[in-house]
Amino acid sequence: ENRRWGINLDEYNILDGTIRNGQIISKLLEEYGVGAQVAGELEKNASDVFSVRKLRAGKNYHILQTNDSVPRADYFIYEISPVTSAVYSLRDSIYCYIDTIPVDTVQKYISGKITSSLWNAMVDGGASYELSGLISDMYSWTIDFFGVQQGDSFSVYYRDLVVNDTVRVGTDRIVASNFITAGADHFAFYYVYRDGRGEYFDEKGNSLRRAFLKAPLSYTRISSTFSNARKHPITKVVRPHHGVDYAAPSGTPVYSVGDGVVTVKGWDSKGGGNYLKIKHNATYTTEYMHLKGFASGISQGSHVKQGQLIGYVGATGMATGPHLDYRVFKDGTAINPLRMDLPAVDPIAKEDMPEY
């Protein structure tokens, strides 16, 4: 017996399709001879399990049609993810249930040397783009990946999610890794606390997570560094530049480097254009200038989380091109963001170190 989705497929022909933009369930099912009344009952009866209003363009679906002389559509199956589907019965009893394919984890290993970028090196070694993103996120507090150089290297143990022993459907997590840049090791080991929370720590039990992200955006290059005497590219006047200019295409997302409260949102009449100030704690405040615009929901008094979208790179105010002027203030005094000693969150407790 050939079974899938909890159904004996020997009794059916399988018709495959993809949800189109603007397509509603009644019109979709109508193409397979299912009346509007059935579609209406389905919309009502399935809402508590997986509402047909959640169907998204580009997702795959399947119609199970009887192989009789007069075919009848008995099931509509919508792929929520590679391993999870919503199964809608179109027969006498109209209902929905969720079917999940059993998923196994397989531990894998990859290593390589950087010749152009981390992403290229990992993909060339057979890793997925997803794994490259996980590495980037994991080290986002401690490594500036736009500063990696040829000859830097990495090694990663990770777990992939597979179905039917061979088909990869995603990455579970990175288990352990080391990224060597400028001759220095950057170890990361995944550890689960007693309360079930998982986090990455180095070989000494220090958390990789920091109070601030290393940078507030993905940038092309640093076009101007922190200086006490820089000639302004427009006014030609030599004056302090107490920030770092990150050159990036207009519209590039800008993120808050840490948790905090927006204290200023507005226009800087001294040349900064659209800008934001975020107070993170009693010590640190950050500033983001020349923004093209602000993210939805961001206003003075807004509470933001680390990594939350706050705006977009622009060239407002006195700017020769799109870039982010990023500034950090410690106890009210501007400091060089590139030389910050980023404070880490709590390390593994001393009593847990033997287990770690």
Image: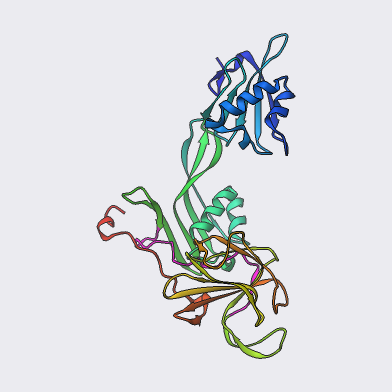
Along the viewing direction, whichever of 25 and 150 lies nearer the viewer = 25
Is-magenta flag for residue 231? no
Query: Residue drawn 62% across and 32% down?
Result: 52
The number of discs equals 0
Q: Position of residue 302 (x, y in %)?
A: 52, 64
State which quadrant residue 11 falls in: top right
Q: Is residue 68 visible?
A: yes
Whether residue 40 is situated above or below residue 353 in the rendered picture:
above
Which SS does the magenta portion mostly show?
loop
Q: Position of residue 88 (x, y in %)?
A: 59, 24
Q: Quadrant of the N terminus?
A: top right
**From what the image shows, is residue 324 above or below residue 58?**
below
Q: Is residue 238 above or below residue 77?
A: below
> Is residue 206 a member of the stretch shown in magenta?
yes
Snapshot quadrant of residue 94: top right
Quadrant occupied by the C terminus: bottom left
What residue range appears in magenta?
A: 201-225
Query: Which residue occupies 66% across, 72% down?
Result: 323
Q: Name the one closer to the observer, 332 or 10.
A: 332
